[in-house]
Amino acid sequence: MYGLVDCNNFYCSCERVFNPALRDVPVVVLSNNDGCVIARSNEAKALGIGMGVPYYQARNLLEANKVAVFSSNYALYGDMSRRVMMMLADFSPELTQYSIDEAFIDLSGLGTGNELYDYGRKIVKSIGRGTGIPVTMGIAPTKTLAKVAGHYGKRYKGYGGVCMIDTDEKRTKALMGLPIGEVWGIGRRNKARLESAGVRTAWDFTRLSESWVRQLLTVTGVRTWQELRGTSCIDIDELPQKKSICTSRSFADGGLCELGKVEEAVANFAAACSRKLKQQHSCCATLTVFAYTSRFRTDMPHYPINRTVQFAVATNDQQEIVSTAVKALRAEWPGDNRYHYKKAGVITWNTMPDKAIQADLFDTTDREKQARLAKAIDTINRKNGHNTVKVAVQGTGSAWQLKHEHSSKHYTTDIKEIIRVKTQ
DNA sequence: TCTGGGGTCCTAGGACCC
DNA sequence: TCTGGGGTCCTAGGACCC
């Protein structure tokens, strides 16, 4: 049996942990740049605030209902996630973190029936008490069915946060009540395709023939089909090494027109990629830089920038990655300031372990010197915070500041913002 | 006026090999 | 006029996830 542990309305719950006044009021969290609503408390969902709606469109509704609005605070969410996962790891050594707010655990050998259910209850209670984050657990013989169980666990209070699908009878009942679009692995496109073929519920889907499913949805669809029928076949890799690393942001207001400003942003994105590569002990052989104008502005001229560069020797060196990204951007720059760039980013890929780099016969770079300098800079930055020493083109960051007007404190990651307890 | 960020996997088709 | 058979690798694009 598998357990899926999922944090309820995770970002909103994080905001509530250190701010009890938010406990029974509607809360939403916005994306970077205060762009869209990306997390909603149950009260906010009940008001009809949709997932992903632009903030400016929801604003009136939010203000009219006195909804507490927060800019995203990833330092806080990342740290709270770490706490939840650490506690969870004590309950099952076989844990696969699937996203910032959910993880699968292997429950084999931990009992059956009521015994297993009670174990689930214990996990949910402990994490709630230990971290302040409410979680729901789905238990079932496959990961996809565990997701289904979790779906019901969140909707019906009576389950006490744990829903288990452990008999054919329960499975049938659960699938009959589940619209096909709610199934993990069935997205918008495939939902439409299946519905036009008369498939309304997850149960209908499991009644199709395998060959039919394969033809319509390829092997990924067949795996979902098998999992819903009770045969486990989806493996989730731990993926300690990411295959590609992307750092990108949207720019506030109308976007950026000047090369110098976009350059500064891209340099910082490239530096972030270098940092992330080093963190997972890998190097990249390829880098892509991109910059896009707003796809929502049909009234303005567009000129997408997208350039990919190969490194002769795979690298994670900050200066090399920053200078390569900036040169690539300059090479594609349109040459006038007519275009409003709304978003830019750097992707590093063709990633490999830093211990297994293929050298280049014709490489003339002094790698040793480069490595010594990088090591010195990394040591300073590790001690004093990243970007204490940076490449000059990274600038001061003021050219492309993000909008973050409703941010909460870094309660758990900055000693200056730690919560105060008043004693009278 | 204002619309997020970061990933993975699969497939088809082209280029290439002997 | 007639033009084989069997592979691999790479890439772009689409679909999905949170």
Image (cartoon, coloured by chain):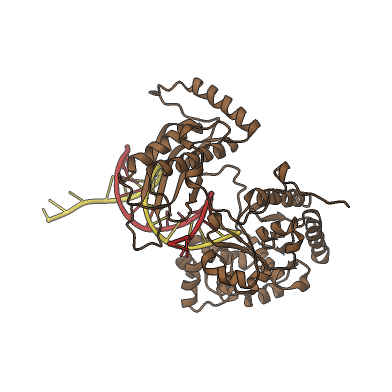
Chain colours: A brown, B red, C yellow
Residue in the picture at 65% in, 48% down: A75
Residue A44 picture location, percent across and down = 65, 69
Side of A301 where A260 appears, left or right: right
Q: Is residue A235 above or below residue A346?
A: below
Quarter of the rendering occupied by the N terminus of chain A = bottom right
Q: Residue C5: image x %, image y %? A: 32, 50
Question: Does residue A284 lie above or below A92 as drawn?
Answer: above
Q: Is residue A259 above or below residue A32?
A: above
Q: Residue furthest bottom?
A: A198
Q: Position of residue A61 (x, y in %)?
A: 58, 72
Question: What residue sits 55% from the left and 77% below the top?
Answer: A200
Q: Which corner quadrant of the image does residue A168 belong to?
A: bottom right
Identify the residue at horizontal 82%, vertical 66% (top origin). Answer: A114
Residue A345 visible in the snapshot = yes
> Which residue is painted at 54% across and 53% down in the image?
A403
Above or below residue A311? Residue A125 is: below
**Residue most extreme to the right:** A424
State whether residue A54 appears in this view: no
Question: What is the x, y in percent for residue A253?
Answer: 46, 56
> How many numbered badges does the structure rendering display?
0
Name the foreground residue: A263 vs A161. Answer: A263
